[in-house]
Amino acid sequence: MQKTFQITAAVAVSALLAAPAQAALITPTLATASSDITNNNDPVYAINESGMNFTGDKNDYTNWTMSAGSGNTAQGTDWMADNPSGVSTWLIVDLGETYNLETISIWNFNPGTTSSTYTNRSSKTVDIYTSTSGVGNNSNDNNSAFDSTGWTSLASDFGLTKNPGNATVSAPNGVLTGLTGVQARYVGISVTAAQIGSRLNRAALGEVQFFGTPVPEPSSLALLAAGGLMMIKRRRRD
């Protein structure tokens, strides 16, 4: 009986260390950008679930929908850049801690109008980068091009579909899934083309969602293993 308990305890500790956690929706802590058109199109609106709705399990990206924003620029729900030179449009999201990413779900700009003048401000292609250490040389609201120094490229010229405007959208405009082995605290999204190229200076995104599991701190793993070993030793003494 004693030997059986010892083996069971050891197996239990091993299982705790090895068992994969269920991916869940991540709540980012901060978003910064190359620029924004007004305070009501601040980058925070690309991460705070404004204009977003879900039915059922919110940790499943397929259960989300996106409502059209209010007015031509979807103020209060979407992020829109404002760079007269039109050469730099990017968004950086701080996830708050390092995660094992599983899925990145991107919802495009969706204004409260079907006018092509505004729907063409939605993004067409983006470069996506990840980092576990910081944002590198990029700083908020500086109108400078995205500096990829220190970043790891995840996707280049990743295509996004265009939203119709003034309508509820039932699926993301671009999804990266199955991101096994990708760890990130920071995710950088550099818009490389708008639906009409001349609109890059006002390119926009509606919402960016991230799903994954926290990366355990080394100290946490050590404590878990130590706790299991103490259980085994205590049983041996008994």
Image (tube, grey):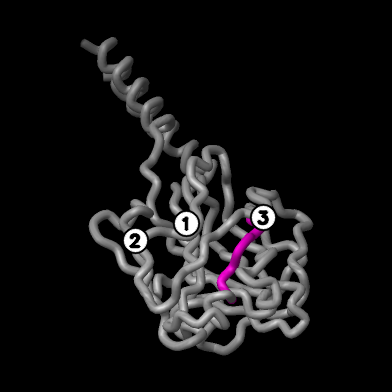
Which mark identifies residue 105? 1
Task: Tell me: 39 left or right of 191.
Answer: left
* Residue at x 43% of width, y 72% of height: 48
The residue that mark 3 highlights is 157
User: Disc 1 vs disc 3: which is toward the camera?
Assistant: 3
Tag 2–tag 3 contact (CB < 8 Å): no
**Disc 1, SS:** strand
- Compared to residue 14, the image places residue 164 above or below, namely below
Cα separation, mark 1 vs mark 3, equals 15 Å
Q: Earlier in the sequence, mark 1 or mark 3?
A: 1
Q: Earlier in the sequence, mark 2 or mark 1?
A: 2
- Identify the residue at the far left of this view: 1
Towards the viewer: 154 or 192 = 192
Query: Label 2 is placed on what type of residue?
Result: Trp
| 33 in the magenta segment | no
The residue that mark 2 highlights is 64
Query: Label 1 is placed on what type of residue?
Result: Ser
User: In which quadrant will I find the N terminus?
Assistant: top left
Tag 2–tag 1 contact (CB < 8 Å): yes
* Residue at x 54% of width, y 52% of height: 98
- The stretch of residues the image draws in magenta is 121-128
**Prevailing secondary structure of the magenta residues:** strand
Percent x, y of residue 56: 23, 56
Number of numbered labels in the structure image = 3
Q: Earlier in the sequence, mark 2 or mark 3?
A: 2
| 122 in the magenta segment | yes
**Disc 2, SS:** strand
Question: Label 3: few (<14), some or many (≥20) within 10 Å?
Answer: some
Percent x, y of residue 38: 57, 89
Cα separation, mark 2 vs mark 1, equals 10 Å
Percent x, y of residue 32: 61, 73
Query: Label 3 is placed on what type of residue?
Result: Asp
